[in-house]
Amino acid sequence: MRRIAMSVAAVSTMVLPLAGCGVLNSAGDDASASPTMGDQVTVGLLLPEKANTRYDKFDYPIIKSKVSELTHKKGKVEYANADADAGQQADQMQRMIDEKVNVILLDAVDSHAIASTVKKAKDAGIPVIAYDRLAEGPIDAYISFDNELVGQVQGRSLLERLGSGAGLSDKIVMMNGSPTDPNAKQFKEGALSELNGKVTIADSFDTKDWKPENAEANMTEAIGKIGKGDIAAVYSANDGMAAGVIKALKKAGVTTMPPITGQDAELDAVQRILAGTQYMSVYKSYPDEAEAAAQMAVAKVQGKDIQFDALTQDRIDSPTDKQIPAKLVQVSALTKSKIKETVVADGIYSVDDICTADYKAACAAIGLR
């Protein structure tokens, strides 16, 4: 609970200054709002998969805690995880519609396939907020990280690691995310905006379901085509796939890893960064995203329109809708020297979590104690 409480304070600062300017003294102000409903709020939360540990470990418990806080412990969260099955997620969402939840936070397995079910929710009068991934269909709002920036940070970090001598003779393998995830396309576009014309993309894969074992198989194929000694770096869109990439390289006999990117700052990845087998990850503050999503959901169904608008000042287009109210949360590169000021400072992991027996020497070397 300590970690969640620290992040609540951080998110609260995004809203409180607006009150000082009089912005919340209308439909968004607790004192004067005429809410659609009171604190008996039921938020449906649909998360996409379990391969990435963040969803069960961070997103769900943080959203649950924040909804409880915002509703004086009278609200609740109905949670379902689709385990990368788009059909299962559609069934889960339909059940929530049938159960008449008040609002749905949807992190889509397949952003296109879920559109018809989003329409069913809309027809039933249930607002849908796209969470982390931009779903198609008539969604009411979207909250995620700045996904193109994620790819830019990854691509820029690879170039910095390769150094000023990097050029078209350097062969890069791109291990992109799932083709059904619109975020993966944005990550890739951001990375390519940094890498194109500066290095050679020798092979590129769109990795089914983001699964590490699929990334491992893809990397094995790339090694066979390029040669293990001719791979200068690997762009991996997330940490789970980075683990699969590293496994394939080790099986091929590589002992010193090329620089490999990641995303999500998973604990295993932080430890790999310490050990030098993974170069970097992208740190995204899940508490900030999750708590803001909970605020948006509760404000939406309680009729606090000014507060909702204050939380969704960005705009984004999907293939089906334009100018969707949105909030894009910023990200940062996590390299070995940044561990202390990111995941440790924000209470995501403690030093004890990171510096287990196998990593004590590496922790001591960077003053992490």
Image (tube, rainbow, N blue to C red):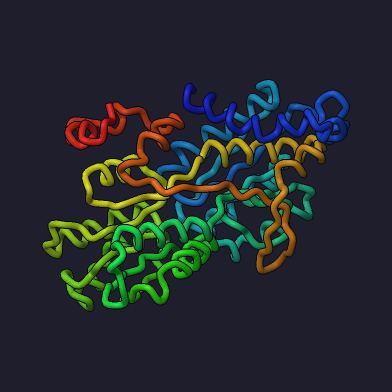
Residue shown at 81%/39% (left/top)? Answer: 306
Determine whether 57 is above or below 175 in the image.
above
Residue shown at 74%/48% (left/top)? Answer: 127
Quarter where residue 311 is shown: top right
Q: Is residue 30 left or right of residue 160?
A: right
Determine whether 78 is above or below 205 in the image.
above
Residue shown at 38%/46% (left/top)? Answer: 334
Please indicate, yes or no, whether residue 256 appears anywhere in the rendered image.
Answer: yes
**Picture coordinates of residue 84, whole percent (x, y):** 46, 55
**Picture coordinates of residue 279, whole percent (x, y):** 29, 52
Q: Which one is nearer the viewer's eye here, 203 or 104? A: 203
Could you tell me which quadrant the C terminus lies in?
top left
Determine whether 230 is above or below 323 in the image.
below
Q: Which one is nearer the viewer's eye here, 137 or 19? A: 19
Quarter where residue 111 is shown: bottom right
Q: Which one is nearer the viewer's eye here, 265 or 78? A: 265
Residue shown at 61%/50% (left/top)? Answer: 328
Q: Is residue 233 left or right of residue 30?
A: left
**Picture coordinates of residue 249, whole percent (x, y):** 19, 62
